[in-house]
Amino acid sequence: MSTYMANPQNVERNWYVLDAEGKTLGKLAVEAAVLLRGKHKVTFTPHVDCGDNVIIINASKVVLTGKKLDQKMYYHHTGYIGNMKKVKYSTLMKTKPVFVVEKAVKGMLASNSIGRNSFNRLHVYAGAEHPHAAQKPVVREF
C-alpha cells in the first residue's frame, strides 16, 4: 500500500462562495482558511499548496461577539519613532470591513510561502456582488 502524494501539476482548484452575513468573524475565517489551505480534500498533502479559491461576500455584515466591537483594537506602526497607531474594530468595521476579514483569515494561514500563495486566492467583497460568476463558484454553507 502506498501513500498518495500530490504535486502542483495535478492539483485541481475549485471556487467557493462564503456568505458572511450574520456569521462570527472567527468561524468565517476558520472556514476560509481550511478551504484556502486544502485541508478539506482527501488528497491533502502538507508540503503542496492544494487549496481552493474562496470568495467572501457581505463582509460588512460579519459579527463580532461580546464586547469585541468596542474593546478590540487594531495596532500598526507607521515606521516613525513613537508612531504606534490604534483603531477600534467598531471604526474599522464601518470604514474597512474587507480589511478586517482579510486580517482574520491571514492570521490563520501559515507564515510561509504556501500561506502567502494561499492568501492570494482569497477574494473579499463588502457587498453581495462579486465579479467571479464566470468561474461558476459553489456556495458553501457552514
Image: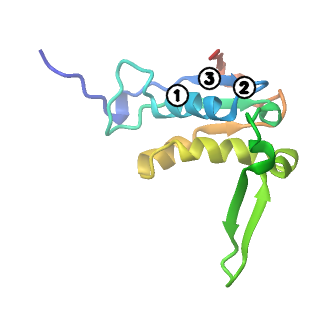
Relative image position of residue 34 (x, y in whole percent): 50, 30
Q: Nearer the viewer, mark 3 or mark 2?
A: 2
Residue 98 sits in quarter: top right
Q: Dividing the image into 4 quarters, which one contains the C terminus?
A: top right
First in sequence, mark 3 or 2: give its number.
Answer: 3
User: Is there CB contact under 8 Å for labels 1 and 3?
Assistant: yes
Name the residue nearer the viewer: 28 or 37. 28
Residue 135 sits in quarter: top right
Q: Nearer the viewer, mark 1 or mark 2?
A: 2
Instruction: Please state which amino acid type lies under the numbered disc 1.
Output: Leu
Name the residue nearer the viewer: 80 or 140. 80
Q: Which mark is residue 35?
A: 1
Relative image position of residue 73 (x, y in whole percent): 73, 55
Where is mark 2, residue-wise?
23
Q: Secondary structure at mark 2?
A: loop
Query: Which residue is found at the position 80% from the left and 30% from the top?
Result: 58
Residue 27 shown left or right of residue 100 in the figure: left
Where is mark 3, residue-wise?
16
Name the residue nearer the viewer: 122 or 75. 75
Residue 89 visible? The answer is no
Instruction: Please state which amino acid type lies under the numbered disc 3.
Output: Tyr
Q: Secondary structure at mark 3?
A: strand
Cα–Cα span, label 3 and label 2: 16 Å
Residue 20 sits in quarter: top right
